Amino acid sequence: MFENILTIYLKEFRQLKRDRLSLAAIILVPTLMLLLYGYALNFDVKHVRLAVLDESMTKESRELQQKFFSTEYFDFAGFVPGESAIDKFIQDNKAKAVLVIPRDYAREVLLGKRVDVQVLLDGANSNTATIIMGYVDGVLQNYSANLTARYMTRKGFSFASGGIDYRPRVYYNPELKSAKFLVPGLIGFILMILSIVTPAISVVREKERGTLEHISMAPTTPLEIILGKTTLYFVLSLAAAVLVISVSFVLFDVTVRGSVLLLALTIVIFLIGTLSIGILISTFTSSQQMAFLVASLLSILPTFILSGFVFPISSMALPLQIVTYLLPGRYFLAALRAIMMKGSGFTDIYDQIYPLVIFALVIPSIASIRLSRKGF
Amino acid sequence: MSHAIEASLLTKNFGSFIAVDSISFAVEEGKVVGFIGANGAGKSTTIKMLCGLTKPTSGEAIVAGFDVAKHPEKVRENIGYMSQKFSLYSDLTVKENIEFYGGVYGLSNIELRDRFSWVMEVADLKGRENLLTRDLPLGWRQRLALGCAVLHRPKIVFLDEPTSGVDPVIRNKFWQLIGQLSGEGATIIVTTHHLEEAEFCENIIMMHLGKIVVNGSPEGIRRQFSNLPLFEIETAQPLNVFNLVELEPWITDAAIYGNNVHVYAEIEAPVSAIEGILKKNGIVDFQITKASPTLEDIFVKETRPKTGVPNV
């Protein structure tokens, strides 16, 4: 039994070693994806180009501008010469937003009156625009309260701290960096591809070439063939996970807060299920193209869209939310994020682990029943 | 003498298509048996059922003393199988392929070392151990594939169209290797559609449309069919002769072989009948003799539709 598995494993390893292209893909794809997702897929909106139309041109109006540009969220994009030029600024993409300070701004402020300040936004990307609006709101609310306090004090009122002082503190990812949120998702994504697509193709390739027919003539059982093959992809998947975690530590400062052992255990349970999905696919398909297509449809797309990798599950339409309960990726990503970012222990993520255990029991059973009944 | 293979009423249907139609036969131990037939005659399907690669729709097969349906694993221990697709991994070296097959057949290290040098010897591959299989010429690859299929010294070796696509010189070398295996006591079952290969076999099973049409030794079959009304017309104008005789309704088949025309004359007093037509049409320079049928003649005759009109 063990010798047979080792024979298959060794053969698979030798073939992969010679297949430079696949080998390069297995190492480069995770690294490349990490770089792309880490740097390109960035939801953080910072350094928004803000232009200013300052009709007041006073000490007060400059102080207001200062409030915006002293944060890292806004960069000064120039003065707009006049009201008619505002459209052109946004149209030419010189600025994402324009702050308009009216002529009588300073006078009204000093009189303690209510002043209208206008901000015009480029709404072509609704997501970014919403975030910018939030920033603008924050800056203005803060400054407005500040002005009121100053006015009251000047008028002789002692301004005791009434109202609410808002002091947020963000746990787990204090700088709210997208990379920290994306890395666990990315590990899931890469493991899905490696553990579903590659074994499916590896088995179907042998079907196409006719070599599988010859191995099944030998006294080696289908189970031994499967174990020999999957062991290699299991090892590769684990190596890819280590690679992604190491690179993201170097580049994005992502650390594993929780137990590494728990993390490894979660990954192993997940891989047992996903490798079996790959094998199951190989029993249904007879060409490499078909296997690739089915495996991609079942792994890459749902993980990317429906597992909470990028799009939060809670904001999906209800039928889709129900579908996500059937995807191992959903639980895996949640567990990974909890372990890596929050440092959660086993009892905290029990709800995510047990569905993964169910997958790891059910799918291999289906695959082996099918194999013993129909062969490959 | 005991039987290496016994098949009774073996049938395989693919949907409504009957690939193998209740065939029964037995193969004696140590024989070289050729399954001859056109593509789609059912040869490969029969082999696959005997190896346990395909489940028969009905009927049973005893291979190496075991029922294929009940003890496929016992059967597998005793057989070797090689198909036209070969079993080799083109991205592994010669040595790695042998090691791999030795491994899946459960050979011990000592056995493997012994068989390794044997394969190197018979496949003429010494000094090429570390070449990738895809870089080997077809003839070597074919012998290596056979070597890999018999690493575990099987009692019965199944070769499914092993010589398709290779030239006659390589084919003869391959048959020498088959002869060597047979000399070591193995029973060999080989399928082919090259009739000249039938002469290398001790027994021939001709298949047509899923049925066995002829079964016997080459000499036995020739003897069995020696009274076929087959005549050879030797002439300087074979084409003219062919065109003339072909028109006669009692000439059920005709073919040109060089300066000779072979005809089946199903009529009383055939020689004088043929002479009659030729002379009537001004051909005088010819000679008619009774011909003994070749295996090809017999195969062509037996696979022609029985009720059909002569070839027109």
Image (cartoon, coloured by chain):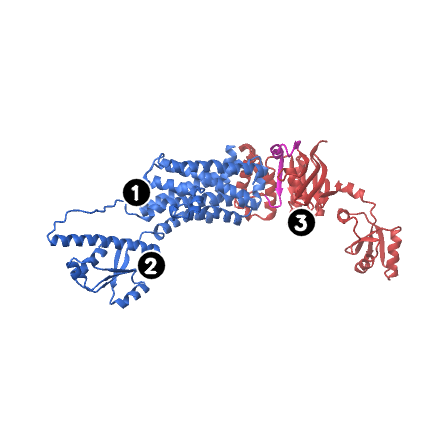
Where residue A101 appears, as percent x and y from the top left, is 22, 62
Please tell me which residue lies in front, A200 or B288: A200
Please tell me which residue lies in front, A152 or B205: A152
Give the CA distance from mark 1 to mark 3: 75 Å
Q: Is residue B283 above or below residue B157?
A: below
Q: The residue marked by circle 3 belongs to what chain?
A: B
Where residue B33 appears, as percent x and y from the top left, is 70, 40
Badge nearest the viewer, 1 or 2: 2
Residue type pointed to by label 3: Pro
Please tell me which residue lies in front, B116 or A49: A49
Residue type pointed to by label 2: Gly
Give the CA distance from mark 3 to mark 2: 77 Å
Residue B75 magenta? yes
Residue type pointed to by label 1: Tyr
Badges 1 and 2, same chain: yes
Residue A123: numbered disc: 2
Looking at the image, residue A196 sits to the left or right of residue B160; the answer is left
Residue B147 magenta? no
Residue B207 falls in which quadrant of the image?
A: top right
Q: Colour of chain B?
A: red
Residue assigned mark 3: B168
Looking at the image, residue A46 sits to the left or right of residue B129; the answer is left
Give the CA distance from mark 1 to mark 2: 31 Å
Residue assigned mark 1: A172
The mark nearer the N terminus, 1 or 2, is 2
Where residue A244 appears, as percent x and y from the top left, is 37, 45
Q: Which chain wears blue?
A: A
| Magenta-highlighted residues | B64-86
